[in-house]
Amino acid sequence: MTYYVAREGSKLWKRVLGETKVELQLLSEKWKLLLVGVILQYVHGLAARGVHYLHRPGPILQDVGFILLPELGKERAYISETVFSFMFFSFVLWTFHPFIYQSKRFYTVLLWRRVLAFLVASQFLRIITFYSTQLPGPNYHCREGSKLARLPRPDNILEVLLLNFPRGVIYGCGDLIFSSHMIFTLVFVLTYQKYGSRRFIKQVAWLIAIIQSLLIIASRKHYTVDVVVAWYTVNLVVFFVDKKLPEMPDRSTGTSPPMLPISAKDKDSKSKEEQHKLLNGNSLDTSDRRPRTQVNGKHLEDSNPVNGDATMNGT
């Protein structure tokens, strides 16, 4: 038993090291795009912090979701955040599973590059929307009479740039249309829908996304319109951005070493080279360098052209 555990542990360690080497190589090539995506996450937080200074509390708007769904109450508002946290950390862990499991369908670096592209495009539209019109926040700390509903004028620029993290992020107001929680939830679910392998988990993920939508409305963190707009906007963003991005290679499940993805430029040059060889009558196998002799439109693979002529002449 001890020998078996040690042997499997050694295999796992070698697998992790091999995967790490490949991912680090990819990271060295794609780190700039990943860094831009992470920086733009901060810019999104900065924009949400800025609109809080513009927020003015007022009467809660009439909302169909508020009428149909009973209010959870201030003491049960954590349920929505708990479901979102479960979805968030489950997805993050899943993106790193190729380091351990043999069934690898994607590279973690390339997957996060895609996810950040989806998030940034959706958040850019969100920033434009909630700065266009500021609605009175329905959340408990955004209502009239709450000290957090209005932010006092900042004493210095650092107060704005540091976002008052994490309190400033949790108790924000004014960044309503459309829901940031639903952006993350739908991007994660759509990504797993394409690159995940478990059908049951895909169905559960969509169910959680629906439950998350209802909990956001029931906890009065957003109006129903914020959730509805998120559903069709994020799906459209992912659909169009995904078409613009180069497709990720579908990794083999075998034991052979993972192959790094070929760039679009390399693919084009390779296809042109193969087409050129076919037009010239050469083999696509570059290792086979035996001379070919063409007689009457046919290629003879015999290395001696004289023998070929003799055969054709019947001698």
Image (cartoon, rainbow, N blue to C red):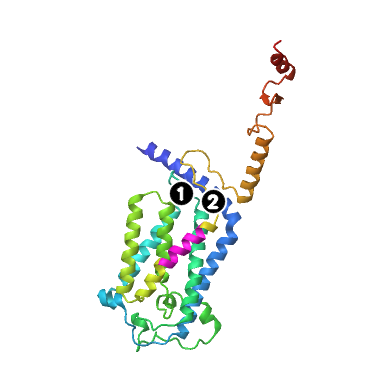
Quarter of the picture containing the C terminus is top right
Image vertical order of residue 269 relative to residue 188, above or below:
above
In reply to whether residue 238 is colored magenta, the answer given is yes
Query: Disc count in the image?
Result: 2
Q: Nearer the viewer, residue 280 or 231?
A: 280
Image: magenta residue range: 232-242
Q: Which residue position holds label 1?
A: 98
Q: Nearer the viewer, residue 28 or 312?
A: 312
In the visual, does 314 lie left or right of 75? Answer: right
Q: Residue 134: x, y in percent?
A: 44, 83
Q: In which quarter of the view is residue 296 placed?
A: top right
Magenta region, mostly helix, strand or loop?
helix
Structural distance between the alpha carbons of marks 2 and 1: 10 Å
In reply to whether residue 184 is colored magenta, the answer given is no
Q: In which quarter of the view is residue 293 placed?
A: top right
Q: Residue at x 66, y 45 (%)?
A: 269
Q: Which residue position holds label 2?
A: 23
Q: Nearer the viewer, residue 206 or 244?
A: 244
Quarter of the picture containing the N terminus is top left
Residue 246, which numbered label? none
Judge the density around disc 1: few (<14), some (14-19), many (≥20) Cα neighbours within 10 Å.
some
Judge the density around disc 2: few (<14), some (14-19), many (≥20) Cα neighbours within 10 Å.
some
User: Is residue 30 at all visible to an observer of this figure?
Assistant: yes
> Furthest residue to the right?
306
Three-letter code for the amino acid on which mark 2 is drawn: Glu
Q: Residue 90: x, y in percent?
A: 38, 58
Three-letter code for the amino acid on which mark 1 is drawn: Pro
Labels 2 and 1: the sequence-earlier one: 2
Mark 1: secondary structure: helix
User: Is residue 163 at all visible to an observer of this figure?
Assistant: no
